[in-house]
Amino acid sequence: MSTPSWSERAYADSRAYLAARAELVRTLGLPLVRGDVVLDLACGDGGLAAFLPEQRYVGLDGSAEMIAAAHARGVDVVHADLNDYVPPERVAATTIFRAIYYARDRRALLERIAGYTSKKLVFDLNPRQYRLVDVRADLRAVGFDRLDVRPFFVPQTRAVPGPALVALRALEQVGPLAALVLRTRFTLICAAWRSGGT
C-alpha cells in the first residue's frame, strides 16, 4: 500500500476538494481555455495539477519537502519564495490558495502578480481574517479592477457523503444563507482581472 500524498493527508476528501477548486480556477471570472498556463503559488505537492488537464500547470513552493512531493507526482514545480518570484514568461492565470497570508506586503505581492498574469488571479480568502473591502482596494490599486467572489463550502478537514456535499455546493448559491455560514466557517474564492481582459 502506498504512502498517502501530502494532499491526501491535508484534505479529508482530496479529490472532491481539489476538483471543486479546479472548477473555479477554470470558470470563475474570465474562463480559461485549453493550453492556458496556470501558475499555482504555494502549491504544496501540486495536487491541483491533476484536475487541470487542459491547462499547462506550473507549481511554486518555498518548501523543499513540498517540491520533492510534487516531483514524486510528476508535477512541474519551481522552488522559490512567492514574494520574490517572477516567471520567465507571462502566465494566463495565477492562483494562491491557503497562502495569501505568506505575503510580506500584500499589495506588493499583488502588484508583482499583476505584472506577469494576463487573464486572472484566483485565490481564497477567509472573510473572518481579512476584510474583502481591503483586499479589493489592493486589487484595484494594481490594476485588477474586476472581481468575482464565490463562497466555497467544500470541507477541507472532514469528508462528507455525496448528498451532503451537493447540498453544501447548492448553499454556496444562496446569498443570505451563505453569508451566515461564512461568519463562522469556510472561505471565499475570488477571481480578479482587468477590464477588457482577454
Image (cartoon, helix red, strand yellow):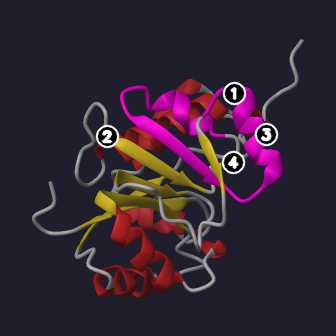
Which numbered disc, 3 or 4, marks the residue that appears first in the sequence? 4
Q: Which SS class for mark 4?
A: loop
Q: Nearer the viewer, residue 140 or 150?
A: 140
Residue type at tag 3: Ala
Left or right, 101 with respect to 64, comes to left
First along the sequence among labels 1 and 3: 3
**Residue 12 visible in rendering:** no
* Mark 4 / mark 1, whichever is N-terminal: 4
Spatial separation of the CA atoms under disc 4 and disc 2? 21 Å
Nearest to viewer (mark 3 / mark 4): 3
- Who's the residue at 58% across and 37% down the image? 76
Tag 1 residue: 73
Residue 162 lies in the magenta-colored region: no
- Identify which residue is drawn at 42% across, 56% down: 94
Residue matched to label 2 = 36
Amino acid type, mark 2? Asp
Q: Dots 2 and 1: beta carbons under 8 Å?
A: no
Labels 1 and 3 touching (C-beta < 8 A)? no
Q: Residues at badges 3 and 4 in contact (C-beta under 8 Å)?
A: no
Is 196 on the left or on the right of 112, as rendered?
left
**Residue position for label 4:** 44
State the quadrant of the N terminus.
top right
Q: Is residue 150 above or below residue 194?
A: above
Distance from disc 1 to disc 3, alpha carbons, whole Å, reads 9 Å
Comparing 178 with 64, the one in front is: 64
Magenta segment boundaries in residue numbering: 46-75
Q: CA distance from mark 3 to mark 4?
A: 10 Å
Q: Secondary structure at mark 1?
A: helix
